[in-house]
Image (tube, rainbow, N blue to C red):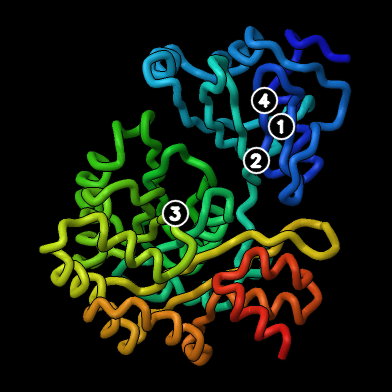
Amino acid sequence: MVNPSEVSIHKLIEIGFYERASDIFVKAHSIPMMRQHSKMVPVPGEWPVMDEANTTRINHDLMTDRQRRKYEEHWEMDLAFEVSNNEGKQLCRVRANLHRQKGSDAIVCRIIPLDILSIDDLGLHPTLKKLGDPRMGLILFTGPTGSGKTTSLAAVLDMININRSCHIVTIEDPLEFVHRDKMSYVTQREVGIDTEDFMPAMRAVLREAPDVILVGEMRDATTFQTSLQAGETGHLVFSTVHTSSAYETMDRIINMFPPHEKDHLCMRLANSLRFIVSQKLVPRADGNGRVCAMEILVCTPTVSKKIEDAQFSDLYDLMNEGDFWGMQTMNQSLYKFVKAGVIDEQTALNYAGVQSELKQMLRR
């Protein structure tokens, strides 16, 4: 049994990396846990029940003095770092959230591969290969936390990096995937290290001669307004929203703003929005990993007109019938995986957008 004072978050992450875990969890009064193929399981090995002093030690060892002061004031901290094995070989990057629970420190670490997989390697829908085609506008990836948005975005940005000579600027909190210069020149700015916050970075980014901009998250109306403006003025802007469908995404955006701005905002979105990709990671039937089910809205002239008229409820039918344009609903994506034997019916129903509709599809 390992002594609690000898527990290392780097060692836990190394084990999780080789076990193909997505997250590592450490808190007081519990043994270290990990998420493996969507299930919570203990980290392999003889690990002790952690005490409060050593969870605090683990957290503090990861932070700089400045970060510790901020953490002690707000009790929340996001940061990123790299993990190497005993031979010094880099294994992965880690996005960590340090927080308090029941009066003691805790940490959750997301394991991020060093290598950026391609759209084909990830098994993503071929429509995503078209996301690098527009030269301006707004592209949104949506889904709950842990649904693979960052991984999909990294694959799309890497595709642009390989095939296009341009300047890509990312603003992230924290910085996750590292993009090296290929055909493009890549600038990556991390909130708290390279910039104070999203807003000052967004104000400055337009003076940095960008062609493609990634805003890690649409946190508020001001960030969205600035991102939309960048998309209107000749830049291709990517970002994420925590919603589970294209319809919910439009509703969330509209509700960020006062009611009297709705008509003008719908007109701007109709002109600037290019794609909405909503995704969920669904456990495979064989228990060996997860697949990415996607709802894809392509802003064709018909879709843009519906957005301009604020007829968001019609978007679902347009996606249902939009296979020619590369569109699909979440249910259509799940149905394809069931028919291919990749996921089972009950799992598909658990992740369905409209469960009654998927039941009818499966019955047919």
Q: Earlier in the sequence, mark 2 or mark 4?
A: 4
Say which of 220 and 212 sits in front: 220
- Do the residues bearing badges 2 and 1 touch, measured as CB atoms within 8 Å? yes
The residue carrying mark 3 is 242
The residue carrying mark 4 is 26
Q: Earlier in the sequence, mark 3 or mark 1?
A: 1
Up/down of 156 relative to 102, above or below: below
The amino acid type, in three-letter code, at marker 4 is: Val
Label 3: few (<14), some (14–19) or many (≥20) C-alpha neighbours in 10 Å: some
Q: Which mark is residue 21?
A: none
* Residue in the picture at 41% in, 76% down: 133
Label 2: few (<14), some (14–19) or many (≥20) C-alpha neighbours in 10 Å: many
The answer to whether any part of residue 44 appears in the image is: yes
- Do the residues bearing badges 2 and 3 touch, measured as CB atoms within 8 Å? no
CA–CA distance in space, label 4 to label 3? 25 Å
Q: Earlier in the sequence, mark 4 or mark 3?
A: 4
The amino acid type, in three-letter code, at marker 3 is: His
